[in-house]
Image (cartoon, rainbow, N blue to C red):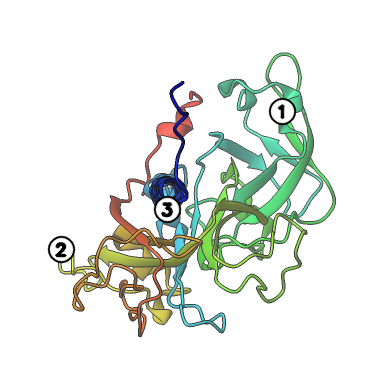
Amino acid sequence: MTPRKGFTLIELIIGSALMLVIILATLYIYSESNQVSVDQQQLAELQQDVRSSMYFISRDVRNAGVGLPGEFSGYFLEGEDNEDQGGEVTPDRLKVIGNMEDPLNLNIANYQGAAANLSLDDYSLEKFPYPDSYYEDKVVLILPNPESACRSGELRQITHVTHSQTGTNEKLNFSHGLAKEFNPPQGLKGSCPSSNDYDGGLVAFINVKEYWLDVTGSYSGLTKGENGYIGEPGVLYMTHNGVHYPLAKDIENLQFQYNGDFDNDGSLDGFVNWQETWTGDSVMVSRIKQVRMWILGRTPERFVSVSGKPPDDLHLYKRPAVANTPEASQDDMHRRFLLDSTVTIRNLSLSLYNLGTR
């Protein structure tokens, strides 16, 4: 009878060791692959947030001032350079105004200023495809006649519209008092000293949009959970008619520069930062023709799937200098994605929204 053969203790130890090595190698490869996947996923999400934010900002800046009379061309935009929120990064802000969402330009027949109703030229409402109910609760900007010396527009909230079936006796009815507390650029908000200034003026749906970055997550004067403010650092907001809408998270810097014929010599002077003297100066603002913008995003988690050590002079994981904001003092192992774009403002007396068509 042939004796049975088995494994010796040494063979079992060697086999177990080899199997353990194979298992550990497999787990290591899986862990590395998984980490690469996690790193690339957060970078891809960051790039998507930055690109979508740039789309919205570029679209609104390109259309800033659309629908406003040419006499108000200096009131379509207002910036702020390097706002100090107490952090290392000082982002810019940009506010624009325009008849951008729902086109509306109604001619004023008579308005007494802060009155409860406003009379329109006959057949004004018939130029637009909105039912009467659509106007309820809409905020409008009431502009004076461009031929008057007044450059103050009233913000009012419509309660309802009234008109006869023949298109005559058309009126906008308002709630008492002025509308929400938000300010158009360049101090446009206000009331003219004479009610006659508004006769022959315009009524337009108001779209005041301000783009800004919350660096700290505890912005002064705002309360977490109120009016759209979420109270987290690194959130890029679009404030539309006083309501805050988060556009993207994990944003590290937001910068703007402006190009125009500021010396009025017939040629563009090159991009510069917003100047404090421009605020309230409608003449200088009317000369702005282009806006350049930068959005810098940073991954929420450190990147660990690094192959080798990058050269000392190649800072892949360091906040770069953007416009007139300095770079960081040291690397922090977070990946960045920087996107910049330049748009030409195509407003300034454009009347494509004044035709009553979309």
The circle drawn on residue 39 is 3
Q: Is residue 215 above or below residue 287?
A: below
Residue 357, image x, y percentages: 48, 23
Residue 31, image x, y percentages: 45, 51
Residue 134, image x, y percentages: 71, 28
- Mark 3 and mark 2 lie on one chain; the one further toward the N terminus is 3
Q: Mark 1 or 2, which is nearer the eye?
A: 1
- Mark 1 and mark 2 lie on one chain; the one further toward the N terminus is 1
Residue 172, image x, y percentages: 74, 36
Q: Amino acid at mark 2?
A: Gly
Q: Amino acid at mark 1?
A: Tyr
Circles 1 and 3, Cβ within 8 Å, touching? The answer is no
Q: Is residue 170 above or below residue 336?
A: above
Q: Nearer the viewer, residue 218 or 98?
A: 218
**Image side of residue 25 versus residue 211, left or right:** left
Q: Residue furthest right?
A: 176
Q: Nearer the viewer, residue 120 or 269?
A: 269
Q: CA distance from mark 1 to mark 3?
A: 47 Å
Q: Specify few, some or many for label 3: CA neighbours under 10 Å numbering under 14, 14-19, or 20 or more.
A: some
Q: Residue furthest front?
A: 1
Q: Mark 1 or 3, which is nearer the eye?
A: 3
Residue bearing mark 1: 134
Q: Amino acid at mark 3?
A: Asp
Q: Specify few, some or many for label 1: CA neighbours under 10 Å numbering under 14, 14-19, or 20 or more.
A: few
Secondary structure of the residue carrying tag 2 is loop
Q: CA distance from mark 3 to mark 2?
A: 50 Å
Residue bearing mark 2: 266
Secondary structure of the residue carrying tag 3 is helix
